Image (tube, coloured by chain):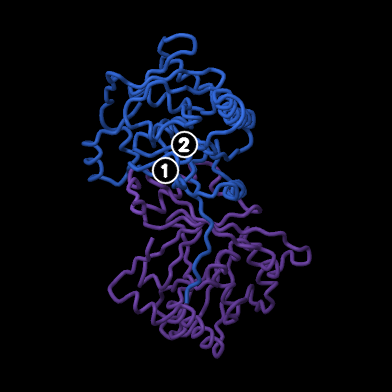
Chain colours: A blue, B purple
């Protein structure tokens, strides 16, 4: 994983305006599990982890709340595991799930997040942005009906299966350029509240191997109120483009 | 991006002399003395009086051909510029092989035969000109046109324009095209502007300038966003 070293970043800034160069400068930092990192348990049927022990303020901007419990998606679990903030435990036992297993899950794209999505997630999180899966509320008001945990799981499963469907569709439609909204992105904000997150600054979208067509952008923009930003990742280098319909000014 | 005026007082000068007014001046001057030119396979060569050459320069039509001739000036016009002066402003006459092309249809067809997709290119050009932007070739920036909000001596161009049409060659069809065009235009402080020129040409309008009425132009900018530079949200309390 490439990390920016702030010293070489400043230096590079003096020489050129090219921010992409920053990605390859600097040394790889060493993360260590901090004493008393958070713990979460992976629930295979949900494709999510239930947080059992929270440490640190990071949970104000990570994970979704359902009937008082916090759950996180695979990209959140993986990111926190990578930076040593989370120990992810297996379903059946307390064996820590290895990064290798998590990378494999992401590579297979079965939990609603593929590798491309994860690279953007990690990159923006590393810069301090707040990310949530598009279309998934940060928190829901308690719903009436069956026991809280059942309702909870079916809610999550429902959202999860929607995500799963969209990923499956994308994998099978490789020929067709499929523009899809993936993450709601908020600017770094120490006062962020899941109960009232406000509108995201933009929605990170992917269009696959080709840039999005004008029609795809129009269709997507009709469905999504926030500005759209299309991500393109190649070899760990992330670029973000916005395509905006304008009406060129009529001059005097 | 805010307009980058080239010198102090340039903005005031631009405000005092709107492009549209200079174009009207050009029209009335040429109405009295119609200039004539002739068509080649790639441009139109126009012969004008020195005062008219000056007006053409102020409106940014064509490039002067430098020569020792003093009483006449030669101006080299692109097809788009020439057709605009002929069809829209009605101030030039153009001939081909010694015959004057009085009829806009003949001129249209001649230009179209020399330049593929002339219709689309011209539609984009006239769309921009009709909004009173100065339009010049964008070749040196890898685009079709660059547009200025006033004379290039007063201001830098703000947009680099790529013309895209279903009927034409697909530009920006792979990601590296987007990266390339956005980076290039950004490095010269311009915003990439894509003009989508599309429409279904009515059968009776095929091969006629009337087909221009069947086209619609839609504008779209493409910008690259830098996450490192945008982290401060000044709007949130």
Question: B101 above or below A140?
Answer: below
Q: Is residue B5 left or right of A109 when viewed as pictured?
A: left
Q: Are marks 2 and 1 on the same chain?
A: yes
Ranked by sequence position, the earlier of labels 2 and 1 is: 2
Mark 2 vs 1: CB contact within 8 A: yes
Q: Secondary structure at mark 2?
A: strand
- Residue A127, by quadrant, is top left
Report the chain holding disc 2: A
Q: Residues within 10 Å of mark 2 (few under 14, many from 20)?
A: many
Question: A204 above or below A146?
Answer: below
Instruction: Report how many numbered discs are placed on residues in the image.
Output: 2
Tell me what residue is drawn at x 41 percent, y 43 percent: A186
Mark 2, residue position: A132
Question: B180 above or below B47?
Answer: above
Q: Residues within 10 Å of mark 1 (few under 14, many from 20)?
A: many
Q: Is residue A203 left or right of B103 when viewed as pictured?
A: left
Tell me what residue is drawn at x 74 percent, y 67 percent: B205
């Amino acid at each position: 994983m490439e990390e920016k070293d702030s010293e070489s970043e400043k230096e590079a800034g003096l020489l050129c305006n090219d921010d992409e160069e920053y990605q390859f400068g600097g040394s790889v930092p060493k993360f260590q599990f901090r004493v008393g990192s958070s713990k979460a348990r992976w629930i295979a049927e949900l494709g999510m982890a239930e947080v059992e022990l929270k440490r640190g303020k990071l949970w104000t901007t990570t994970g979704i709340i359902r009937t008082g419990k916090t759950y996180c998606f695979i990209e959140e679990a993986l990111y926190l595991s990578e930076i040593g903030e989370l120990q992810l435990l297996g379903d059946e036992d307390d064996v820590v799930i290895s990064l290798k297993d998590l990378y494999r899950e992401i590579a297979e794209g079965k939990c609603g997040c593929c590798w491309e999505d994860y690279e953007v997630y990690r990159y923006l999180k590393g810069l301090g942005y707040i990310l949530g899966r598009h279309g998934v509320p940060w928190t829901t008001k308690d719903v009436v009906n069956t026991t809280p945990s059942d309702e909870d799981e079916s809610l999550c499963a429902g959202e999860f299966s929607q995500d799963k469907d969209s990923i499956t569709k994308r994998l099978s439609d490789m020929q067709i350029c499929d523009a899809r909204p993936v993450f709601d992105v908020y600017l770094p904000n120490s006062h962020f509240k899941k109960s009232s997150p406000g509108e995201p600054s933009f929605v990170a979208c992917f269009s696959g191997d080709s840039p999005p067509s004008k029609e795809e952008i129009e269709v997507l923009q009709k469905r999504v109120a926030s500005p759209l930003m299309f991500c393109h990742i190649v070899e760990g280098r992330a670029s973000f483009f916005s395509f905006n319909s304008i009406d060129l000014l009529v001059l005097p | 991006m805010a307009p980058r005026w080239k010198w102090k007082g340039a903005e005031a000068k631009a405000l005092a002399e709107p492009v549209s007014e200079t174009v009207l001046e050009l029209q009335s001057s040429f109405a009295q003395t119609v200039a004539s030119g002739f068509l080649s396979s790639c441009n139109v060569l126009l012969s004008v009086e020195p005062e008219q050459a000056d007006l053409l320069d102020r409106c940014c039509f064509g490039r002067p051909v430098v020569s020792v001739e003093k009483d006449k000036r030669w101006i080299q016009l692109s097809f788009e510029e020439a057709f605009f002066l002929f069809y829209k402003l009605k101030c030039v006459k153009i001939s081909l092989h010694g015959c004057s092309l009085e009829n806009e249809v003949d001129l249209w067809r001649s230009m179209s035969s020399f330049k593929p997709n002339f219709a689309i290119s011209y539609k984009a050009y006239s769309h921009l000109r009709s909004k009173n932007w100065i339009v010049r070739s964008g070749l040196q920036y890898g685009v079709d046109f660059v547009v200025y909000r006033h004379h290039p001596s007063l201001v830098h161009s703000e947009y680099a324009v790529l013309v895209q049409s279903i009927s034409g060659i697909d530009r920006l069809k792979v990601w590296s095209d987007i990266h390339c065009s956005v980076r290039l235009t950004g490095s010269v402080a311009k915003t990439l502007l894509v003009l989508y020129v599309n429409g279904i040409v009515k059968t009776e309008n095929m091969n006629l300038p009337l087909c221009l009425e069947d086209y619609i132009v839609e504008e779209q900018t493409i910008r690259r966003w830098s996450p490192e530079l945008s982290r401060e949200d000044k709007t949130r309390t």
